[in-house]
């Protein structure tokens, strides 16, 4: 998968250069100037949480390289609507077309119907994509530490702040986590979250214990989002016991007949 990730990133760089010729940066700036302020994804995930509450960023995606087609009857607006009705705090929308069956246009389609902040989840390799994301209606973006250098992440955090975008800076392993953890909250607190992905990129297996091991290296657990491998209310309880009150969940919900019902079940309180 590490090699597959390199291939995706190489493809994405070609796609971005093509996008720049089709839609110049000046055009994106014009579109952004016509938009209102982004919805506050950071606040939706972090602010005013109760002690036994977990905020869920619920994901919309049709497929992935590791799982294949996850949902044949894929309707991004209906899925996002059901998530909202079930108590999601925000929506994560895959926009990579080739490997995830996404589309940049899904963001605005979802936003037109659902009042939640929408995270653009893609392989961000160029600052152009931040402008592109904001112009498409995104309220937040994902930055992957395995894809970007430390300096690139810092520059993108600055630009994201200027655009009013919340960032989730995601790491898959402890080494990457140690390199990026001190950048969370830069250049201004209240705009960035720290994602810990429980999927091993070498084996493609998920292990919730990965988050529990990683949080020992994190001072402020309030901004941590645990991602991948979360399936049960007991998983959420286990994370809360370690100070983690935000998660990103997708594949488990999307494999169920009704993703909204699945999210409601996930958020069901655990009886002691």
Image (cartoon, helix red, strand yellow):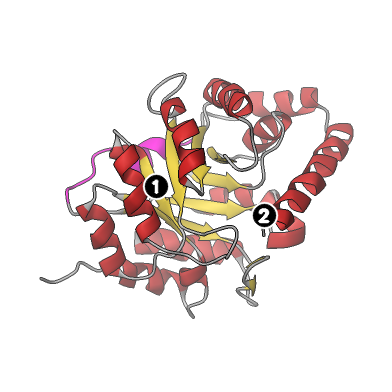
Q: Residues within 10 Å of mark 2 (few under 14, many from 20)?
A: few
Q: Split into 4 quadrants, where in the image is the C terminus?
A: bottom left
Residue at 81%, 48% (x, y): give it.
11
Dot label at residue 225: 1
41 lies above or below 2: above
Q: Write down the region rendered in magenta.
A: 39-51
Sequence-first tag of 1 and 2? 2
Pair 1/2: label in front: 2
Please state the horizontal and vertical placement of residue 121, each as a whole percent of the image: 59, 48
Q: Is residue 50 magenta?
A: yes
Q: Which mark is residue 2?
A: 2
| Residue sitting at x 46%, y 39% | 177
The quarter holding residue 156 reads top right
Left or right placement of residue 55 versus residue 157 in this view: left
Q: Give me the C-alpha separation between circle 1 and circle 2.
A: 22 Å
Let me know if residue 241 appears in the view: yes
Name the secondary structure under disc 1. Answer: strand
What residue is at 78 percent from the left and 22 percent from the top?
A: 26
């Amino acid at each position: 998968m590490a090699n597959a990730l390199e291939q995706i990133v190489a493809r994405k760089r070609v796609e971005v250069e093509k996008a720049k010729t089709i839609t110049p940066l000046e055009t994106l700036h014009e579109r952004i100037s016509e938009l209102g302020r982004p919805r506050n994804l950071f606040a939706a995930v972090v602010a005013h949480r109760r002690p036994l509450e977990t905020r869920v960023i619920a994901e919309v995606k049709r497929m992935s390289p590791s799982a294949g087609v996850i949902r044949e009857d894929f309707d991004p607006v209906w899925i996002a609507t059901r998530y909202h009705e079930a108590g999601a705090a925000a929506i994560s929308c895959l926009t990579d077309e080739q490997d995830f069956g996404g589309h940049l246009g899904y963001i605005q389609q979802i936003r037109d119907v659902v009042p939640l902040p929408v995270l653009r989840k893609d392989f961000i390799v160029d600052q152009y994509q931040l402008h592109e994301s904001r112009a498409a209606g995104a309220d937040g973006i994902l930055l992957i530490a395995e894809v970007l250098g430390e300096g690139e992440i810092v520059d993108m955090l600055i630009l994201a702040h200027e655009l009013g975008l919340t960032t989730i800076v995601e790491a898959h392993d402890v080494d990457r986590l140690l390199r990026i953890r001190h950048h969370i909250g830069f250049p201004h607190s209240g705009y960035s979250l720290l994602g810990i992905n429980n999927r091993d990129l070498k084996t493609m297996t998920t292990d919730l214990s990965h988050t529990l091991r990683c949080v020992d290296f994190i001072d402020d657990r309030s901004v941590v989002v645990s991602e991948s491998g979360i399936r049960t209310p007991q998983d959420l309880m286990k994370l809360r016991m370690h100070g983690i009150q935000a998660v990103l969940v997708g594949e488990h919900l999307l494999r169920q007949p009704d993703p909204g019902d699945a999210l409601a079940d996930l958020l069901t309180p655990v009886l002691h």
